[in-house]
Amino acid sequence: MTFLGIDVGTSSVKTLLVDEAQAVVDEASAPLAVSRPRPLWSEQDPEDWWRATEKTVAEIRSRNPRELATVAGIGLSGQMHGATLLDDGDRVLRPAILWNDGRSAAECAELERREPRSRAITGNLAMPGFTAPKLLWIAVHEPDVFRRVARVLLPKDWLRLRLTGECASEMSDASGTLWLDVGARRWSVEMLAATGLSPAAMPRLVEGSASSGRLRREVAEAWGLAPDVVVAGGGGDNAAGAVGVGVIHPGQALLSLGTSGVYFVAGDRFAPNPERAVHAFCHALPERWHQMSVILSAASCLAWIRRATGASDEAALLAEIEAADRDPRVLFLPYLSGERTPHNDPTAKGAFVGLTHDTDRADLGRAVLEGVAFALADGQEALLAAGTAIDSVTVIGGGARSLFWGRILASALERPLVHPHGAEHGPSFGAARLARLAVTGEDAAAVCRPPAQAVTIEPDASLRDRYRERRVRYGRLYEELRATFAALR
C-alpha cells in the first residue's frame, strides 16, 4: 500500500509517492507560471494545475508503475486563498486570483464595514490576499462574471473536483477565505452574505484527515490506479507542511521558506490576534488550530536577486554569498509582493538601502537573506505579543536546504532552528500522511511524528548582537518609506 501527496504550489505542482514505512518512493514536479497582467495582480489558469499534476503522475508512473498501482489514498495540499470561480456547469469563468494578489485593498475595508463582527468570526483581518475580498472586487469590476458565479473553490479543491467530481474543502484551507467561522469550524452565513454569496456557493467541509471522495474511474485508468482510491481532505500548504514534520501539538512551530515565508505555531484552541495581522486558522487535523505570521516573499526574493544579478542558480548564489561571508552594510526590504504580517500593506515594495560603488552580487544576496530573516523576526514578535508560546521551531521548504541561511535566521530570531531530514518535501509529504489517515483511521500522533533531525542550528552570538541593532534600522525604513510606496502604486 502506497500514498500520493499532491501539492499545488505557486511555482510548481509537486507529487510524492510514499510507502507504508513513510519512505519516499519517488517524486516529481512540474513548473507553473504566474501571470501579472497589471500592477498588484497575480493570476493562474487552473488548467495549468491539472496539466502539471498529470505530468508529475506520468513521470512517477514511468519509473515506478508497480508501486504507483498500489496507491490506496491521495492527499491534496495547495497554495491558499486563490479564488477559482465556476459557473453552474463547473466551468472556470476567469483566471484564478492568487494569494499574493493585492488588488482588493478597498474591498477589505468594505467587507469589514458590511460585517462589523468579521474579525471575531474569522479571527483575522480582512487582507487582499484572502478570498472574500477578491469576490467583492469581481462584483464591482467584473459584474458579468460575478452574476455567473455558482461556486468558488480554492486551488487544491478545484483539483479535487477534477479528480473525484466532488466539491469539497477542509478546515485549514477554508480558514483563509474569510468565509469560515474558524472557532466553530463551519461556514459563516454572515460573512458569505457580506460578500453577496450564499452557502450554496461553498463546497462541503471535511477534516483534512477524512475522506472527501473517491478517484473517478477515468482518472484512475489514465494514471494506472485502482478506481476506489480515497482522496483525503488534505490541507492548505502550511498546515500540510506542519503535518509532514509532526508540528501538530501546542507550542510546536514551523518556519516555511517557500515562495512566501510562514511562521506557524500549532495549538489546541482558537486564539485570534487580528490587530497584529496574525492569522488564526484551523489545523488540518480535528480539534486543532494554529496561529501564523506570513511574509509574502521569502525564497522568492532569493530567486529574484539571482535573476537580477545573473547568477546561474540559487545554489551557486548561496555558495558565493557564504564564501564572501561579510557584512554588506546594505539593508533590504523584502516586500516584492506587498506584505502581510505585521504591516498588512499590499502597496509595500522591495528596497535596497546603503548601496555603494563597492557593493557586489554577494553583498546584495546577503542583504536579501538578512532582509527575509528580519521580516520573519517581525512576524515572530507579533506572535509572541499575542501570547503565543513557542517551544521548538522546525524549518522546511526550499530555503531550508541552506544551512548558511539557517545561521542567519537563527541569529535574527534568537532561537535554535531544527532542520529535519526530508525538509525539502514540505506540504506534499504532509498530504500523503493525511491520505494515509483517511484510509487507515490511525491515530494522528502515531503517524505524524517529527522526522529525524539532520542538524540544529544555534544562534551565532556575534550575528545576534549585530542583528538586534540592524533590525531597529530595518524597522524604521518601512515607516519612512510607507508613503512613498503608496505613491508608487
Image (cartoon, helix red, strand yellow):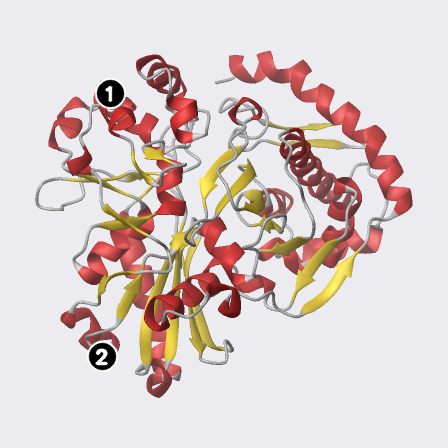
Mark 1: amino acid: His
Q: Position of residue 99 (x, y in %)?
A: 41, 38
**Element at badge 1?**
helix
Residue found at the far left of this picture: 89
Q: Which sits in the foreground, 470 or 187?
A: 187
Q: Earlier in the sequence, mark 2 or mark 1?
A: 1
Kindly indicate the quadrant of the structure image that contains residue 103.
Answer: top left
How many marks overall? 2
**Residue at which label 1 appears:** 141
Against 376, is 274 above or below?
Answer: above
x, y percentage for residue 439? 33, 71
Q: Is residue 315 left or right of residue 489?
A: right
Looking at the rendered image, the disc whose residue lies closer to the viewer, 2 or 1, is 2
Left or right, 355 with reference to 170: right
Q: Nearer the viewer, residue 326 or 401?
A: 401
Amino acid tagged 2: Ala
Residue tagged 2:
226
Q: Position of residue 452 (x, y in %)?
A: 66, 70
Name which residue lies at 87% across and 36% down. 466
Q: What kind of element bears circle 2?
A: loop
Horizontal arrangement in the rendering, residue 410 relative to residue 303 (left or right) = right
* Residue 443 - label: none
Above/below status of 72 relative to 93: below
* Image point (61%, 68%), residue name: 451
Q: Residue furthest bottom?
A: 66
Could you tell me which residue is drawn at 33 percent across and 26 percent down?
Answer: 133
CA separation in Å, label 2 and label 1: 45 Å
Q: Are marks 2 and 1 in contact (CB under 8 Å)?
A: no
Residue 343 x, y percent position in the rendering: 58, 24
